[in-house]
Amino acid sequence: MKEQIIGILEQVKGGINYAAEEKLIDDKLLDSFDVISLISELADTFDVEIGIDDMLPENFNSVDAICALVERLQEDA
Amino acid sequence: MAYVSLEFLGFLIPVLLLYYLIPRRFQWAVLLAASYAFYLLNGIPQIAFIVFTTAVTYAAGLIMQKTRDENKVKLQDPEHPLSKEEKKELKKRMSAKIHLVQTIALLVDLLVLIVVKYVPFLAQISNSLLNALHISFQFPAFSILVPLGISFYTFMSIGYLIDVGKGKYDAERHFGRFALFISFFPSIVQGPINHFDVVGVQFREGHKLEYKNLKYGAQLMLWGFFMKLVISDRVAPMVAKVFSADYAGYSGTALFLGVLAYAIQIYGDFAGGINIVIGAAQMFGIQMPKNFTQPYFAESMTDYWRRWHITLGDFMREYVFFPVMLSKPVNRISKFFRSKFGPGATKLVPSIAAPFVVFMLMGIWHGASWQWIVYGLYNAIVIAGGVALTPLFDKLTARIPRYQTAFSWKLFRIIRTFLLTCVAKVITQSPGLGAAFAILKKILTNVDLNLLVINNGKLFELGISPRSMLILLAALLVLFVVDLLKERGVQIRDRISEQPLVFRWMLYIAVISVIVIFGCYGAGYDASAFIYQEF
Amino acid sequence: MNWKQIIRIISFSLVLILVFVALSDVFETEDTLIAQRYNLFKTFSPGMIDAVYIGTSAVDRYFITAKAYDDYGMAVYDVSSDSMPAYAYLPLVKEVLRYQQPKLFIFDVRPFITSPSATTSMANARKVIDTLDFFSPGRFEMIFRTAKHLHGLEPDTYGFIQPGLLFTFISDHGEWDEDDFSIVNQPVSKYLGYHLSTTTATGAETLKASVYAEEMNALNEANEGYLLELITFAREKNLNILFVDNPHYVDEAKSSVTDTIFCLLEDEDIPYLNLNTDEIIAQYFNRKKDFYNQGHVNYNGAVKFTDLFAKWLHENYDFPDHREDSAYAEWNGVYNKIQKQVKKLRDKNKK
């Protein structure tokens, strides 16, 4: 799943070393539009619904965090 | 009581003394009393509004928290383990209850804001409409004196309700501390719009008297006074003259200068005022978020709105933009576009729809009039347009690789963005929409370069004398240098601390003297009086 | 926060106040002739002055100290400023007493006729306040009284505390003129306090006939208070005082109040001299040539007034003749200087 997520991220916004970054949101590496695109792609690819309640920086700051979010949503679904 | 006044200083100093003399666990009480005293000094009946909003928000927060806590207990109860379906059911019910309470509280708070601020305008529009339809019914014209800071504290309440609903942090149980968060006097008048988990939690701790806080806070306040009194108020007569009902009498160039003057005035006034606010809060040991980061250095409108009135932009992004974008209706629309136009459209729909929602809201948040609505529309179009055209720009400039990094390109973008923001300012500052468009048209068509010839003195009929103009230019230079340093990341107050004592004291005395001597304020100075001096 | 920091804050505040005091010295009020008059007064050695004539522009446009000195050797000096408010009299008397022990205080009645609201303004107050020494008690009293009156007149504009009066440069901040700066301190009057200008040298307007009232109207309450406090103080300190009204146009309202003042003075047994009568004007002045506006004499009128008033003083008071006294060496020839300057201004005006 991690590679898939990195792939999506690079599609949304290239030029960032996603494997290494831990502060994608806090350091403003992704802007609001990027996050929206990311969320739509994630929702489509993994068939999960990411709601407004999940819009916390800690859920998107790193690839691992995104992974954890998606897995949790898949479980709860 | 205005922030830029001797009375405010006279108010601040005793409060500071009391604050640091009293045992730390009561500091919040001093601030709460001071905040309500400050509020009452601005009008007594209005206090009912803020108390009402505070109470409703506080109660809703507690209820939501209680629901969440009870649920957590049930979910994790080892004596009554639940199946997966039961857990899901429980979570769903909890979520529903929380959302219900949240929605009711949000509606109530918003309703108060809407009734106070927007009903008169809506009544006016409805009446015009009824008139046009030849219906004789008319809504009564009424207007309430708008309670101080209602736009700001309502938004802070909304943010709190949404955050607690999300479970981002626990609700505040202490009513006094919560009331303080909503009414804190430095930020009640013009923001920043604070988050509870950033500023509100600071009221839970006691704050030791730190010399650095006093010093840095005082310096920031001083800088704010400089921006407001020496720059903004000095340029105010020109703005008042050019944007008055007599605007038609001025040439396009004069109008353009007036627009520039307004850009300077609003920056000095607002950012200067915020400096005073943040500086004052710092003196109490309360750290507030930045609200301005050199906005006129922005290279695009999007960038501009990340530098100007930052907390408002953050609020819109967090509580309007994202929820709207992630809502089901918008999702369905995105999917629809994607299926028709391919994956590229995914980004396009939100990028165009979102700015419209956000900026229309931002427009009417500022004020209830057509001008603000058009203002919102204008910003939305520029930003949406910018996003939509980015791929095109990128293709064009990709051929010329040096462009992206060249300074001249950066300068071009800065100036372009500045001019775009100036148009927005004309829309709102002019005496009416018709005037706004007329002014814009005249600026573009009626050029009077004679105005700029210093010797014939025509320049100085716009409201600023030669001497005043000189002082203004000198002050603007200082402002520019300081902002440039800040843009480069220089921590100005730290750098000043590193200098020898004699230099620091000379600097403080110089700045204070400049403000006192060259500031435009007080009974002796009257902006309109200067205008009439020529008669 | 430790003691070192507290001491630093206090020392900085002191340094700041000192800088403000120094700056106050540099920024002066616009009318330099007034400042020059006061500055010269402060240079006289104690005991030099026989009498001071306190009041509005009705003093320094009328009484030519240098001429009275030339004619009789008396040292009667004008301590006046334009539109001086009535509440300034007592503080000024106290100020004068810090420098001199005059045998007589002459008071111009005009401030008591107009209500304080007409004369109270930042500008008029500052004409007195700015020229007094920064730390003189008279200045603080003036500041306090001015603030009180301004606040009473316009409570919304003027707070109870007026830093603009204490530190002069605070008031002028919006717009500066070259005249407002005087780094070369303490210019002194070249004409022993007489207000010599193009207007007084060359101005001419026919004086209308005053309208004298039949009834007496009450004095403004505040003014009456200021008048009485002056009289009380004079009695306490055993000062000789004299009230004077000199020739100018008065309407019915003004003359009715003037009569009340004279009545009050009579009741209090205070000497006064009413020179603003048709008879005096007919006998000693020329309505067409001696006035530059309805309120003031020009140079011609001033010469005549000085003749009239100095003679009266000489006959009624015992002022020594200082003309041989070396201490007054600089007073000799000042009247000549005045005459020369008047001629110069008149020649220039003809062109």
Image (cartoon, rainbow, N blue to C red):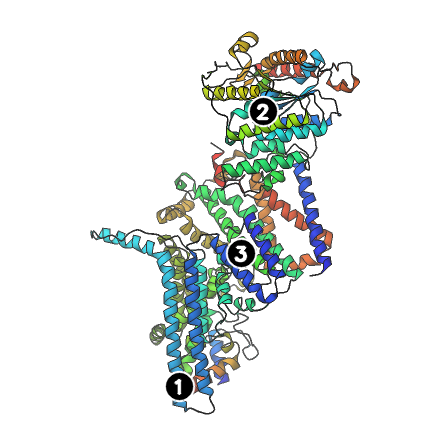
Q: Dividing the picture into quarters, in which one does residue B524 lie?
A: top right
- Of residue A68 and residue C205, the one placed in the foreground of this image is C205
Place of residue C279 in the rendered image (x, y in percent of width and height, measured from the top left): 53, 9
User: Disc 2 or disc 1, which is closer to the eye?
Assistant: 2
Place of residue B428 in the rendered image (x, y in percent of width and height, measured from the top left): 41, 51
Task: Say what amino acid the circle numbered 3 marks.
Answer: Ile
Residue to which mark 3 is pinned: B274
Q: Residues within 10 Å of mark 1 (few under 14, many from 20)?
A: some
Q: Is residue C101 left or right of residue C297?
A: right
Q: Which chain does the numbered disc 3 sit on? A: B
The residue drawn where x is 43% and y is 40% is B251
Q: Is residue B35 above or below residue B453?
A: below
Residue to which mark 1 is pinned: B88
- Residue lying at the far right of the rendered structure: C326
Place of residue C80 in the rendered image (x, y in percent of width and height, measured from the top left): 62, 25
- Of residue C257 and residue A64, the one placed in the foreground of this image is C257
CA gap, disc 1 and disc 3: 47 Å
Q: Which mark is residue C56?
A: 2
- Of residue C257 and residue A1, the one placed in the foreground of this image is C257
Task: Say what amino acid the circle numbered 1 marks.
Answer: Lys
Q: Regarding mark 2 in the picture, which secondary structure is present there?
A: loop
Place of residue B475 in the rendered image (x, y in percent of width and height, measured from the top left): 59, 47
